[in-house]
Amino acid sequence: MIYPTGWLTSLRSRFNSSLKVKLLIALFAIGFVPYLFILLYTLNLGEAKIIQSITQTQYAQVDKIKRDVEQQMTRLENEVLFLSQLDLMDDMIVGDIDKRISRLLTQKKRDMNLDLELYCIDPVNRVIASSSLENLQQPFTDAQRVKEAESQHHTYYFDNETINLFSPIHASFEDQRFLGYLLLTYRLDDLNRFNLHQNSVRSILVNASDTSNALQQQQMAVLKLDGDNGDYTTDEEMVLYKAVDGVLQGWYAVYMIKKSSALAFLDDFIIFLGVMSVIGLLFIALFSNWISNQIVKPVVALTTIAEKIVITEDYSNEVAATSADEIGQLSRAFNTLVRQTDNALGALEEENRLRLQRFVQLIGIFNRIIKTQSEEECIEITLSELEKLISERSFSFTRRAAPPEMMAIAIFTRDYDTGERHYYGAITLGGETSNDEYELQFYASIGTMIMLQLDQIGLVKRTREVSKAKSVFISHMSHELRTPLHAIITSSQYLITYGTLAEEQLPVVANVENSAQHLLSMINDIIDVARLEAGKVPVAIVPLRLENIEAMLLEVTTMLEPLAEEKEIILTYRRESSDDLMIESDLMIESDLKLLKQILINLLSNAIKFTTEGTIILRLDADDQTLKLHICDTGIGIEADDITQVFNDFTQVREGNQQGSGLGLSISRKLARLLGGDVTLSSEGAGKGAEATVTLRRV
Amino acid sequence: MRLTVLVLLLIFFAWGEESSYKPGEGVQVGSLPLYAGGYFSLNYKQNETMKQFSIDDLALLAYGDSGKFSYLAEIEASDLYVRNLQPENNHTSDTRFHAERLYLNYDFNDDNALRVGKFNSPIGFWNLSPINVLRDTTSSPISTEILFPKYTTGVNLAHHVYTVSEDTINLMLQETRDLDAIFNSGDVYNNFDIDRHYGLGLIHSEGEWKFQFNAGRFQTMEPKSLYYLMASVSYENESFKLLSEIGSQHDNNSFTVPYAGYLQGVYRLTPQHSLIARLEAYKDHTLDQKEAFGVFGYTYRPIYPVALKAEYQSHSSGHEDQFLCSFSVLF
Amino acid sequence: MIRILLISALFFLSLDAGELVVIANKANIFKDRLSNQNISRIYLKKKRYNGSLKLVALNLSASDPLRKEFEHSVLSMSDLQLAAYWAKQHYQGQRPPLSMMSAASVLAFVREVEGAIGYIPKASVDDSVNIIYEVKTTP
């Protein structure tokens, strides 16, 4: 059962998925069921009709035979009557001496051309005249039978194989004097001429009332005759019969037709219907297929186009809508829908583009607003940008309160001291008052933007002012501190050198002098920072050759060598001389040699300060763009996370016995940047030493 | 036309079936003493204004006798088919059959007979054989047309006296309308429309001479009483025949037809061929006509019951001359 | 058959034309002796009765010379006149006399039928009938 189930399922799924199959089946059913019904009805009706028609036809045949026989007998009767009433029969009186009657009878027999004889019998039962001469003057033996028949008001009697019709003859004179009888003897076998003797059809005439004839009896035994007419069917034959009227009363015309022959037409009809049903089935199937194709074709076209549109997103495709029916309407509606969708998408895209443009414009506005340095510039830029953006409105700025009837963007600024907000002014909008929420929001955000910018401008101004004040204060204070410090140092040195100090007093004074020296250096650093920040460091940029730099480097090394030796640290200078590093002798930079020297002193001092043992190497190298001075030590090193912090003012990563202001690296970097270079620091970690690099741009 | 075919078939049948048949004697049919016959004629008429073919007098008759009774019935279609060639080319047909004659005869004996029904009035020589084939000419003398009722519906009593001569007295009585329904419905075509007729006829026949006198009164439906008087004489031998009749008609006040008569001679060239000349004159107050004219005719009978006739009428008034010919058969 | 006819025809032709007689049945007794005119009237069916007995006139066949002679001598009418007469009688409903083929049959008929009247050669007459008229022939 798996196969048929699968087959059924596939059929069901096909049925459910295909409109065409549904239509096909529906159309086929609609076409074929009534057709089949009609065929069956026709078959039923036709069968009845054909049988009826066949029966009628056969009845007509029987009837024809019956009527032929009756007509024949009537004709004979009439003939007898006619002859018996001729004037010529008056010759009976004279015994037909002139043989006129005999001649007439002979002539008559010849004319009728039948197996019959005509006689004239006189009242004493002699044959007076006859159609055959040998009977003349013979005695008539059936006179008794004539009398019997006459007494029963019959004009005929049956003999062995003949029927005898007679009519009395009366004279035309003397009050219809009786002259005798005219007698016609007719052989019944002759009636066979009306019977049919064909292969499939035969007919017989039987006398149902005659029991004397053996052949008749035999025939009657086979036949089932009842009533005036009827029909019945045996295994082989269809039998129809009709009773014969008139002289041959009691006789039947029986007609027998072979069933195969009688019903041949019915068989043909059934075969015809069968063929018709097959042809009809095929035709309806083909027609249904064609019709469903015709119906579904535009739908398929619609579907194909729709799928294509979905895949390609090309809305320019159209379905060809030629018909005026619902499908045509659907196709047209579909085309309209596609066109409208296409238009809508286009419009949406255009709108998006516009929106993006607006957005870009807005960003531009914001950008320009952000870049403004002063409040006036900010307002001015805002107004001009707004007018560019929204040409249908006019924008103006007022410090006073905006007129209440006008749309306006109120602008407030923040006072950072008090934290309060103050009314700054308003941008008034010319043109009609709008209730569009989005427009209002837009103007509100513009307002917010302006306020933010104004706040920023205010904040920046204020911060600069504060920073400037701090630098001035530090500078002033350092200068003021240096004077007493110099006095202390000078006094201490004097005491040490020229005083008369006890042995135990000397280290104390020396400690004073050291502390003062340290304080002074710290103050110098702070002054340097302040000067750097105030931009008061004079820079004298000159072109420097490599030998100038190397000379400076040697000088610095020499200068700091004693400090290194104090801590038993080896300080060396080395010029990079590997093969791939080409340091051209014509290498030149533009820099301030004095400041460069200070940077190096700072960096070397730092290296010595944070190194307890090992070496410090000053190394020079260069590439196409830059000249680099590397100071590598084997000191305490620095964690990678801390590297950025050490360049901040007043920052030392780790407190140790190495005292310092913590401004060394910060000052070095600031100086280097002042010279167009930079200072960077790298370390592989704590305890792994550090390397500071001064980068200078080559000319 | 169907009837023509029928009649022709009947002739054929008659000839074919009974060897004893002779044309003009009818044929015996049926189980009763009944003889059937008939006649018809085909006419052509031409005068200054008209040319016309017609089939008239198609009739079937049946008669028979039994003992002293005898009967006769005749139906006739008059102007069965008329084809006009001039002045207009058209045709009319009337297939209605009239009850032309229908009577029962009883012979008391050889001398007296009574007839009841509709029959030819026994007046003059022409009225007892008023059909084309039995006439000498296609036309009948005007005196036999306008003076007396040609048909009587009623009783006729005949008395014969046979001595050396033969004398017959006929007494006609009519007290009713015509027997034919079509005739009574207004289609008056061959008789006066009468409902009363009393007539007396005397016939004296001796050798080759024959004299006849008739008088009578009849009443038309108008009603109008008319009296007629007619005298006839004929002489006939094997080669020729002379006929003459004269009569007049009178109403209660004056003559309606002061005179109408003719003199006719028939000369038999051979038994088949005859020449006829007839002079006629009449004066009719009713129609306000007075005329005299001559009729010259020729008749050919291959056998007596078949006649081909031609005649020319020459009128005194000019313009009414006409030519007639006909083919007629009695069977 | 034909031979019989021929023989009888020869037989009649050989007879003297003057020997024609009119015969009647024995029962048919005429009160008066019949004249030529009476016979003529019977054969023209103007006279149809003898008392209450209806007469049956018998002719020979149309082509028989005896008939011709009879018609000429007794009826004094030509063929044409007779034809015209019987045509008119047919129109009036009257039949011509019966005709028989031979004198023998006429004789037999007259013998058998009471009202029958026929004419036959005198030589053929026997005692079974009455002669009622002897035709005076005109040569």
Image (cartoon, coloured by chain):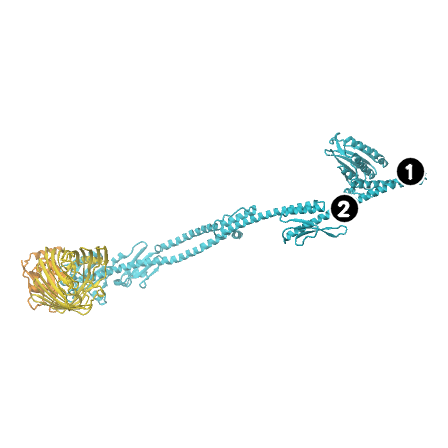
Chain colours: A cyan, B yellow, C orange
Q: Is residue A142 visible?
A: no
Q: Is residue A162 left or right of residue B158?
A: right
Please name whichever residue, A472 or A136, is drawn nearer the observer in this view of the structure. Answer: A472
Q: Is residue A387 left or right of residue A179?
A: right
Q: Residue furthest top?
A: A585
* Nearer to us: label 1 or label 2: 2
Residue A484: x and y in percent read: 87, 41
The amino acid at mark 1 is: Tyr
Q: Which residue is mark 2?
A: A463
Crowding at mark 1 (Cα within 10 Å: few <14, some 14-19, many 20+): few
Residue A572's mark?
none
Residue C122: x and y in percent read: 6, 61
- Can you tell which quarter of the image residue C33 is in? bottom left
Cβ–Cβ under 8 Å for marks 1 and 2: no
Residue A321: x and y in percent read: 49, 49
Given the image, what chain letter belongs to the residue carrying mark 1? A
Kindly state the secondary structure of the residue where label 2 is placed.
helix
- Can you tell which quarter of the image residue B312 is in? bottom left
Q: Which residue is mark 1?
A: A494
Residue A271: x and y in percent read: 39, 53
How many badges with numbers are in the image?
Answer: 2
Q: Vertical placement of A629 versus B17: above or below?
A: above
Given the image, what chain letter belongs to the residue carrying mark 2? A
